[in-house]
Amino acid sequence: MAKYLVIVESPAKVKTIKKFLGKNYEVMASNGHVRDLPKSQLGFSPEEDYEPKYITIRGKGEVLSKLRKEVKKAERVYLATDPDREGEAISWHLTKALKLDGKEVSRITFNEITKSAVQSSLKSPREIDMDLVDAQQARRMLDRMVGYRISPLLWAKVKRGLSAGRVQSVALRIICDREAEIDAFLPKEYWSLEAQLIPEGEKKPIVAKLAEYKGKKIEIGSEDEMNSILSGLEGKEYIVEDVKKGERTKKSPLPFTTSTMQQEASKALNFPISKTMRIAQQLYEGVEIKGQGTVGLITYLRTDSVRISDEAETAAHAFIEKTYGEKYLSEGAAAKKGGIKIQDAHEAIRPTDINRIPSDIKDSLSRDQFRLYQLIWRRFAASRMANAVYETTAVSIAAGECRFRASTSSLAFDGYMLAYTEADEEKEEKQVTLQAIAEDTKLSLESLEPKQHFTQPPAHYTEASLVHTLEELGIGRPSTYSPTITTIIARRYVTKENKNLYVTELGSVVNSIMCESFPTIVDEHFTANMEALLDGVAEGKVPWKSVVANFYPDLEAAVEAAEKELEKVTIEDEVTDEICEQCGKNLVVKYGPHGKFLACPGFPDCRFTKPYYERIGVTCPKCGKDVVIRMSKKGRRYYGCIDAPNCDFMSWGRPVEKKCPRCGGYMVVKGSRLACADQQCGYTEPKPETDA
């Protein structure tokens, strides 16, 4: 009979951990949380000192019943839930749900599911850390307050089924702000000049770019300016004025944190954030490897630390020296921690055994598991390797009052790049002829290539860049990035096309309400400060109930004010001139997941609906019929002809009736100005105050 009971979160871990322990141990899973605040109510009140009222989660009765039977048999219970705040809270909830107060109970944690880590954790059990539990309780209650008090207002204002969230609403605002910035962006014209120059005795030209004019850095803003410079270069000699040779070091990367893994998997593997976390969870919990059984392949996947254990450091050192040679060893990882907030309870994400090379276990993994494991393995190996070194050559070329620059770099020592290069690793220009060029060398001009450019608007957010921004601003934590992005996409506030995130009309409406009625909730600095307070709770410096008590009254006041305001501005269904084809009533405008549509007010007796096309008072530049607002399949707004598909006119920018005085094309609204839709034309003018 088993004397000891080990309780983990996930059933996938049971098999892996069981084989590391003897027959005296029984391993069972709680299947995540077993208690939570009730769904039907807030779950706490100021009058009762904000004491949360937990209930057993529906469907967990059978799991708890089985666990109770094993608890009675066991001499000692080990709570081995995940090594983070949420895992600590689950362990605490288990002590309450299983009534373990009179039992021998110990909390154990391990950062990786390996035999040595699991057995080592049993040798150093501890009590439940109530500071971590309280930090998780505070987070849960803050999120519950925002969700349960604001969501009903969104139902009243827009439609049922919407939600607000402490972190998700800030993420939505960040995306909306970027969309507004892009919409208001006006492209600015600029020019560049490249010279194709052939050194004496050479056949292949080098490419040099104009860098200075009359001793100053040059910014060419128009074709006239460019023509003036070109005329000044006529008949001029091109002579090498200066040659500088040097060395550039490229530092080896840090091992992965949750955030950097999500970003790199998005760029290198094209994985959505949610997919990255799902596959990383599988690699952490254990995969069946031929000849080895079920093995946990990576360390814990939710971390913001880049720390590496001494054992892992030693193993990596030995592997790199044996596989690549001593010169590839890093001089020391101690200086690589940078300004990142380190939580030393965790390590960075790394392979549990660096000797388990990805190619050796490829047959045991799915394609996606292999690709992610290989990325993590290579990144960790590279982080323990020497820096890469480049030899650089920079050449300055004089021609009249102009100075051209040409530069190149060649890899002198590959270092960590032998094992790993990042997805957006810069591509080095290779101009081998620069290596042999000396000062005073004369160059013959093959051609001058002036090029017109236009400045580009800020890029739309991708999942990866949004995670980077949230982390940079201190909003959310490693465990929250994925569910936050998943929620705003699932609610149809944001749509994803290719890799870009776009705000839908529904998202814009919800964001407007949040910014107007709850500016504090969507303020990034307030949210980041709240995360810092929760960290203070976890460190035992801030009482958790004081965080909750300070937040709730202000939220309640804002909700009451918004409720009064909403009563005044409640929007009735907009009645249109369109007639229902089934019952003859005037159709009304309704909101759906993809925006507005027309519906019969006689619902549910009459269920007639049809698409709603909002005319903007502009005629189609192609056929002269009305331009209307349309929605793409993924909920993104654009402007198209009402006669589609017979007419294929469409524009992402809002068109106006006025034609471009320079090229005759149609113009669009760009913030406070009107701009020609043809970017190559580049004409803009102030927008009239009366313009829609």
Image (tube, rainbow, N blue to C red):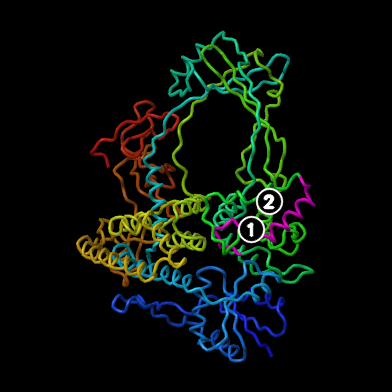
Which sits in the foreground, 259 or 164? 259
Residue visible at 75% across and 51% down in the picture: 320
In reply to whether residue 688 is colored magenta, the answer given is no
Q: Position of residue 149 (x, y in %)?
A: 32, 69
> Where does the C terminus fall, quadrant-wise?
top left
Disc 2 residue type (three-letter)? Arg
Between marks 2 and 1, how big is the CA–CA gap?
10 Å
Q: Which of the two labelled residues, at mark 2 and mark 1, occupies the earlier sequence position? A: 1
Task: Work out which residue is located at the far left of the displayed protein and give it.
Answer: 568
Q: Position of residue 378 (x, y in %)?
A: 68, 52
Task: Work out which residue is located at the far top of the displayed protein and give it.
Answer: 235
Q: Say few, some or many: other residues with alpha carbon within 10 Å of mark 1 (under 14 / 14 to 19 / 20 or more).
A: some
Q: Contact, CB < 8 Å: mark 2 with mark 1?
A: yes
Residue visible at 57% across and 9% down in the picture: 236
Which sits in the foreground, 289 or 97? 97
In reply to whether residue 319 is colored magenta, the answer given is yes
Q: In terms of secondary structure, where does tag 1 sit?
A: loop
Residue visible at 34% across and 52% down in the picture: 613
Q: In terms of secondary structure, where does tag 2 sit?
A: loop
Q: Position of residue 463 (x, y in %)?
A: 51, 53
Q: Residue under circle 1?
A: 308
Q: Which residues are magenta?
A: 300-326
Instruction: Tell me the number on the disc at residue 464.
Output: none
Q: Residue under circle 2?
A: 384
Is 118 rendered above or below residue 568? Answer: below
Q: Position of residue 387 (x, y in %)?
A: 67, 43
